Image: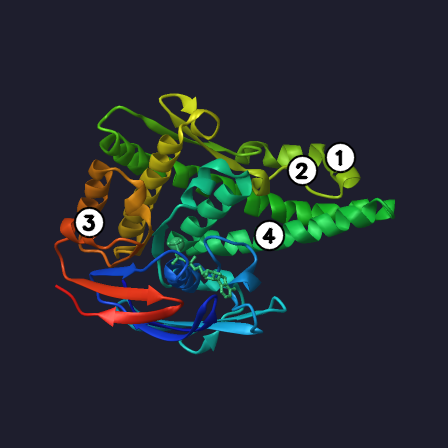
Amino acid sequence: MIIKNMYLKDFRNIKTEEINFNENINIIYGNNAQGKTNILEAIYAASVGRSHRTKYEREMIEFSKKDCHIRADVNDSLKIRIDLHLKRDGRKGIAINGVAAKTTGELIGIFDCVMFSPEDLYLIKSGPSERRRFIDIELCRINRVYFSKLKMYSKVLRQRNNLLKKISKDKSLKETVFVWDRQLIEYGEFIIKARKEFIEEIEKYSEIYHSKITGGKEKLKLKYKPSVSAENLAYLIEKNIDRDIIYGSTLFGPHKDDLLFFINGADVKNYGSQGQQRSAALSLKLAEIELIKKHKQKEPVLLLDDVFSELDDTRQKFLIDNINDIQMIAACTGVEELIKKIHSKTSIKYVENGCISDYSFL
Ligand SMILES: Nc1ncnc2c1ncn2[C@@H]1O[C@H](COP(=O)(O)OP(=O)(O)OP(=O)(O)O)[C@@H](O)[C@H]1O
Ligand SMILES: [Mg+2]
């Protein structure tokens, strides 16, 4: 899979630009604060409908504008056009080949890209919701049944929580909660089982990569931490109904899950060094590529934001050697060092103050 070109309008500091990408290596270079990450962010947004660095979509709209546009032409076996229209009032329009999508989720899995960026550390360091989002995006990409069950689960959860709040004022409504419980349990059990399998699978690849990256010194382990097992979900939902009513929300279920990382037995979030956290995130991302390749028989596009400057020489070389034959779009401030390490056909773009110029190179 490759991205052929992208048109941006009023996206952060980029006014109007059309960018063509080659199918191998694309380097975006320029000084700090010129718009390199913004370009990668726009590509990522065309892939999953959201930013990799903010949950506030309005931040992606140029300060003085009411809306912004991203249009990406991607090539799979077919040509696909993705349109994203973000409005300051929070509304969002997505179209795939000109047909409007009803939800952001419909976009996931159409154009897969994997981003390596300084923000990856948040995956390990921040709260469980970031990690659940990671799991959900990856699973939705490779498993459309998961996508529909997750959508149904979220809908039922919302309705059950609304009802719980009403029950505290009108106890007679308590009898109706079982209608939602049945569905919540059905979808919830499916999600927990799918996440467990997914984490076991991605762990295998992550562990291998992490061992290679660290020269065999470190063993990375991933541990799924569901708030409740699939087998106990029905029991805990029924048992906790009175507590749920007091809190006005559902206390157990996959919406409370987490994912833990261990290096040589120690929890990376609490005990890992910055470098270990970074390497764990890198291994996870490399594993993500393998999973997409395995399940979809196609390669994702790789987005690398300043990753090279953060890695030592061995890790840089490891990364480059492992991403052969995949379209790569990399942002960096210094271009000379990077070029020495790259051999395939490379296209270079220079970014200054949100304007992008093309350099035909090598
Ligand atoms: N919504 C917005 N509207 C206009 N400009 C914005 C908006 N959001 C960010 N910017 C501007 O975009 C620039 C930052 O762009 P970006 O993060 O892509 O920089 P960069 O080239 O990746 O720099 P670095 O090398 O430091 O990572 C800043 O000048 C910032 O003020
Ligand atoms: Mg940047």
- Say which residue label 3 marks: 337
Name the kind of residue labelled 1 in the image. Arg
Where residue 98 appears, as percent x and y from the top left, is 43, 78
Q: Is residue 30 above or below residue 71?
A: above
- The quarter of the rendered structure image containing the C terminus is bottom left
Residue 251, numbered circle: 2
- Spatial CA distance of label 3 from label 2 is 52 Å
- The quarter of the rendered structure image containing the N terminus is bottom left
- Say which residue label 4 marks: 154
- Spatial CA distance of label 1 from label 3 is 59 Å
Q: Secondary structure at mark 2?
A: loop
Name the kind of residue labelled 2 in the image. Leu
Of badges 1 and 3, nearer the viewer stands 3
Q: Secondary structure at mark 3?
A: helix
- Spatial CA distance of label 4 from label 1 is 20 Å
Residue nearer the viewer, 46 or 355? 355
